[in-house]
Image (spheres, rainbow, N blue to C red):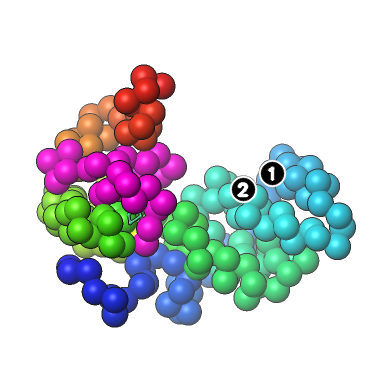
């Protein structure tokens, strides 16, 4: 894929296609997570309870692995917004997944700095190594590959986020090694961002 201003935005994993997948099973927070949500919401005035929407979605994703349509409805009810408003937020942020994903979600930034520095080649290598296209999850359920817009580390392009860990200045060779490393060592391969590694953190 080549960078172009008319490039379609949708990755296939968010709600932006406006065609939600299977709404999933009925959802409710575990008592612990619901209590945590109320704790967070208590930081805001009652009339600004909607400010707890992002933390609520993180709690859903930690519980369910993604944010299903049923979970969006539940969050809307407990936060006091409409399901459409929740869906808008889920579809806006690439960190939320509107359908099930693999254990490791590899998000390759495809915006200008990363595109100019070889993001397309990184995506191609990951695609060939995993045997899937962007927007797909491999048969083992271990990896999901996505292309996303700017991850905010443009000076360290190209950038690949793996779950909540940023990998920067990623070459195609390093991307292939990362997959091997994740297969061999699991989460221990997520050593953190390039800057953290440089600083010895
Ligand atoms: S353009 Fe890729 S991180 Fe900003």
Residue 138 point in image, percent of width and height: 25, 53
| Foreground of the two, 201 or 52 | 201
Q: Is residue 4 above or below residue 60?
A: below
Decide if residue 69 is in sight here: yes
Name the residue: 37% across, 62% down: 149
Name the residue: 49% across, 50% down: 65
Which residue position is annotated with label 2? 59
3D distance between C-alphas at marks 1 and 2: 7 Å
Residue 136 point in image, percent of width and height: 28, 61
Decide if residue 136 is in sight here: no
Q: What stretch of residues is rendered in magenta?
A: 149-174
Name the residue: 23% across, 60% down: 115
Residue 47 point in image, percent of width and height: 86, 62
Say if mark 1 contacts mark 2, CB within 8 Å.
Answer: yes
- Magenta segment includes 57: no
Using a 10 Å C-alpha cutoff, classify the residue at mark 1 as few (fewer than 14 neighbours), some (14 to 19) or many (20 or more).
some
Q: Quadrant of residue 198?
A: top left
**What label does residue 33 carry, if any?**
1
Residue furthest to the front: 155
Residue furthest to the top: 200
């Amino acid at each position: 894929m080549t960078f172009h201003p008319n490039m379609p935005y949708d990755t296939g994993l968010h709600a932006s296609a406006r065609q939600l997948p299977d709404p999933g099973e009925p959802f409710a927070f575990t008592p612990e997570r619901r209590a945590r949500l109320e704790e967070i919401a208590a930081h805001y005035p009652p009339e600004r309870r909607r400010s707890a929407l992002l933390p609520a979605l993180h709690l859903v994703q930690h519980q369910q692995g993604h944010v299903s349509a049923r979970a969006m409805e539940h969050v809307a009810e407990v936060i006091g917004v409409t399901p459409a408003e929740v869906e808008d937020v889920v579809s806006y942020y690439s960190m939320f997944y509107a359908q099930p994903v693999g254990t490791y979600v590899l998000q390759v930034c495809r915006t200008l700095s990363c595109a100019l520095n070889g993001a397309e080649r990184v995506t191609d290598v990951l695609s060939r190594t995993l045997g899937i296209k962007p927007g797909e999850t491999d048969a083992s359920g271990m990896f999901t590959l996505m292309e996303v817009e700017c991850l905010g580390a443009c000076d360290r392009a190209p950038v690949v986020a793996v779950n909540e860990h940023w990998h920067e200045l990623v070459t195609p060779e390093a991307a292939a090694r990362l997959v091997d490393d994740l297969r061999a060592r699991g989460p221990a391969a997520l050593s953190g961002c390039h800057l953290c590694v440089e600083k010895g953190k």
